[in-house]
Image (cartoon, coloured by chain):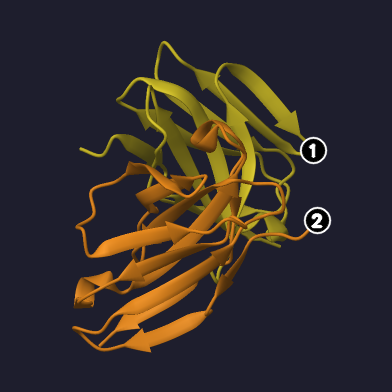
Chain colours: A orange, B yellow
Amino acid sequence: ETGVTQSPTHLIKTRGQQVTLRCSSQSGHNTVSWYQQALGQGPQFIFQYYREEENGRGNFPPRFSGLQFPNYSSELNVNALELDDSALYLCASSLPRGARDEQFFGPGTRLTVL
Amino acid sequence: KNEVEQSPQNLTAQEGEFITINCSYSVGISALHWLQQHPGGGIVSLFMLSSGKKKHGRLIATINIQEKHSSLHITASHPRDSAVYICAVIQGGSEKLVFGKGTKLTVNP
């Protein structure tokens, strides 16, 4: 059974650019959630996908978008990057009950926006 | 005021000490998670509970739904327990987790 993986590990972008982060879910999990964690803060919920459909969204602007693929891997896309987007981005996969099931987190992608 | 508050923010202990980390929340919840985050970012789920108490090895988690409070206890602490411990709640009727800011625990040998 493989765990949750994320790529890339680290990424540096400049303001205004676009970025795509990737997440591969744990085998058998069809729900994925994305979180943003600023330095010294707890994670903040961005959105959740279940069976390729968005299934809940946090307080993030539309320039944060996502996709989930038939194999349950997932992408987080951020357009028009701002300095405040610098953070650790975490994905977590789970069974269909989402947050009411155990969450399996990936190691995260650390994004720096200059 | 954050919906999920943890205390203390930072905690330093000597190896062998009994540790308690507290979590209070202000919203109705369906369940609560305790998570452990090591330097570098990886997060591991420790417990998910909606009532009573759970135990796993040296870790014990309790929750009092009426008082909107949960505690994480570590018995016989060890330097390898050093990490950030995060409480997260599932708001009733929602699919999203709301996280506390975490408690940074350092256990010295």
Residue B57 vs B28, above or below: the answer is below
Tell me the quadrant of the picture where the C terminus of chain B can be found.
bottom right
**Residue B75 visible here:** yes
Quarter of the view holding residue A3: bottom right
- SS type, badge 1: loop
Picture residue at 76% right of the left edge, 60% below the top: A2
Q: CA distance from mark 2 to mark 1?
A: 23 Å
Image quarter in which the N terminus of chain B is found: top left
Of residues B83 and B12, the one nearer the viewer is B83
Tag 2 subunit: A
Residue closer to the observer: A85 or B15: A85
Disc 2 crowd, CA 10 A, few/some/many (<14, 14-19, 20+):
few
Residue at the far top: name it: B66
Residue B22, percent across and down?
A: 47, 34
Q: Position of residue A14 (x, y in %)?
A: 25, 89
At 71% from the left and 38% from the top, the residue drawn is: B75
Q: Locate residue B77 relative to residue B25 in the image: left or right.
A: right
> Three-letter amino acid code at disc 1?
Gly
**Chain to which mark 1 belongs:** B
In this rendering, position of residue B98 left or right of residue B1: right
Question: Which of the 4 quarters of the picture holds residue A87?
Answer: bottom left
- In this view, the residue in front, A20 or B108, is A20
Image check: B55 left or right of A33? right
Do the CB atoms of the residues marked 2 and 1 lie less than 8 Å apart? no
| CA neighbours of label 1 inside 10 A, class few (<14), some (14 to 19), many (20+) | few
Q: Which residue is mark 1?
A: B57
| Residue under label 2 | A1
Q: What kind of element bears circle 2?
A: loop
Q: Is residue A5 above or below residue A29?
A: below
Residue type highlighted by circle 2: Glu
What percent of the width, then of the height, locates residue B2?
26, 39
For the point 42% across and 84% down, the residue is A11
